[in-house]
Image (cartoon, coloured by chain):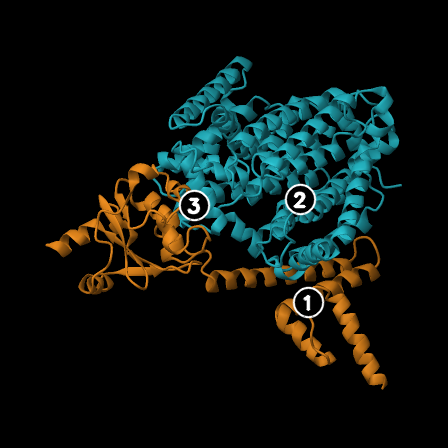
Amino acid sequence: MSKASLIQLWVFVLGFLFCNLHKRTFDPVFRTLIALPIGWALFGICATIVYSVYFSAVSQMVFLVVLALTTLALFWANIRQGSLSRDSILLGGASLVVLTGACFLVDLLRIVTMTPDSSYMARFGQNIGLGNYEASRMVFSMWGPLVPFIHSITNLLDQKLYWQYQPVLSLDLVAIVFYTIYTVIREQKSILQSCVAATVLVSLMAISNIFLFHVFYIHVNIISALYMYLFVFALVKLQQQPGRAYELLALLSLIAFSLVRLEAPLFVIVILLVTSFRQGWSYVNRLKLIIPFTVLFVAWYARVYFILPENSDLLTKQLAITFISVLVGFGLFTIVSGLKVLDPIVKRTPFVTLIGLLLVSVTFTVIKPEHMLTSLESIVRNILLDGDWGLTWYVIFFLAAELYFASRDATERHLMFMVLVTYILLVYNLAYFTNSYRIGATDSANRLVLQALPLVLLYLSNLRFPPLLRRFGKNQEGIDHGSEGTVVTYTATDRCRWDALASKPDP
Amino acid sequence: MSKIGIDKMGAALTSICMLPMPIYASSSEAIVREVVMGIGRLKLLSIIILIACLISARLVARGPSLGRKLLLGLVLLTFFAFQGRSILDAYRNTGLFQRHKTMALSDFQIVENLYHSSEFSGRNILPLLVADYMPQAKVFLYDANLYRKELLGWSGRNPDSTFVVGGYQSTMDASFKVACLGRPHIIYKGRSEEPLYIATPLSTYEEETQVFLMKDALMDYLIPGSWRVSQHE
């Protein structure tokens, strides 16, 4: 077995041990599927902390020791908590066998797709592992540190390029999207119907040239898609199943997502403004999610400020200060959001965010009409014609129209819908600060759209199948829309009541 | 008169509907020809089928019915057929998903021509080659100003101890040049204006302790040290 596969197995074990601590919330399949991304997230966080504190030739050794200690700590926590039952060990073992098979298959295929960006990311990342500070710091002005950190272990693998992690994570993304969509639909439909529906929806993503290219592409797109999906999914689930498990999943995913792309913290802030400042979210829960994120990233960008070379790429020193200011502002707003006097504003934060982004879009378009409209044209043209999507978006529009008219009065979909709309508005607004988006599959807006596609599929699955909660909401008004500070808990009794309500015909 | 008016209206409507398509033609037939050429016959047909299905679905009665199921079936059939064919075409014609023998950045860029990065093109490919294939070789350069120190550092090795300036005969003589050109090699240019002669396979450099950057009027040559030894012998 190659060392590259062994590293992936180690990362999986790390993630699995973490997920196993929350086995009461995460079902076995979900626990297994998210283990690898969670493992890489922990890997990225450890690497970020180690290299932020001390960057030299021995940092790699220190980092490996930290990773090993984290694994041991999680193992110990599993033993202490009694989570490492026979079933868990069997599940972990079986998953390791499956992952080994996937790694073997990927090794056998030996497919990789590259662009110049890939070569910078890999080369600079490898230099991090060699402790070569001067020859790697440029990368921190181009992308987030997670993927370069993954490449930093290349020298330990007896390889010239570490490519195996990318297809394995891509397969994992497909599996996670399939399983989560399946579980959403399964609440209403039979196993066969749910399987067929999930297969069709996932095919819209997986059977397209652009997605297949990105499955093997050494870049940040699929990884950020994976973490953004897990982040939003965890936020949606938090509303239904509050508790530490989904809180931690959301926190780890949002941190990992922000460690992948430079602009990701902005997306995270917008998503959090839209989702966590709603009724039903307690002040404490909001703080638990947002404060660790802001503290970590203020510290990271402060560190990056001193790392950046004179001829930095995208992230300049001024931009780093702007990022820090935005994060500090967001953190402060979160802290004061508990004040009664701000209640009317806080309650309307999602709508204010949406309207604000819309106004910004209009303003930017008025200031730079040609630049912004060219970008808009490129986004539309890439989605419909030139972005290597084929018919994906046409079918999505068809299904969206069908599902919308089939369940027009559903309310739960608004959360996902707002996330998607604000995301697209932010993508459009970002064009103002860079060159206008161009026509072609590798355009950055097209890749940002790819990143959001799994969420669009999740939204489609939610469009059709929310009546369970909807009926509950209609009949038990006020219970699932608890006042600020209350936590909504659903018990087994509630579940039975939902089932009873769901079995009644539509009024 | 009315025909010209209809043509103009048609052209305007087509350009609005196909907003992203650059249309420079004057007659409606030319416009249609441009659109078909731009999008592709098959894709256009598939798009028309899907749009027709989208409109028809609004006309068919709501709720589960045979008509609605047939429409959904047609949409999915069109989707799977088109996407399947498109992926097959990409697999056969682009070489994107080919199996690679050597997984190294320099092989991808120099030998397989997968991409051309602006930083690592032509003579500037040296840092990638050093990183991948020269773990211990000293690299001799004929001019201190050929490379930025930062670029040499990107090789991952210490530039001060790896790269040596001067101390050797850097101009290619005619007979040695003929001998080098007779060996397996690649002349790599990429996006750069200055091409570089590189011996192939790239693993040739792996066992070398010295590598020399030489030149003639046309280009630079990256010569394995052992070749120069044999030349002198």
Helix, strand or loop status at disc 1: loop
Q: Do the residues labelled 2 and 3 touch (CB within 8 Å)?
A: no
Q: Which of marks 1 and 2 is in front?
A: 1
Q: How crowded is mark 2: few (under 14 residues within 10 Å), some or many (20 or more)?
A: many
Q: Which of A285 and A145 is in front in this view?
A: A145
Which residue type carries mark 2?
Ser
Spot the residue most to the top.
A80
Residue at image coords 71%, 66%: B49
Measured Cα–Cα span from mark 2 to mark 3 = 29 Å
Quadrant in which residue A464 is drawn: top right
Rendered image: mark on residue A106: 3
Which residue type carries mark 3?
Val
Rendered image: mark on residue A194: 2
Point out residue A216 in the picture as x, y percentages from the top left corner. Answer: 49, 48
Measured Cα–Cα span from mark 1 to mark 3 = 39 Å
Q: Can residue A241 be seen in this view?
A: no
Residue at image coords 59%, 24%: A23
- Count of numbered marks: 3
Which chain identifier belongs to the cyan chain?
A
- Labels 2 and 3 in the same subunit: yes
Which residue type carries mark 1?
Met
Among numbered discs 2 and 3, the one appearing first in the sequence: 3
- Left/right placement of residue B163 relative to residue A234 reads left
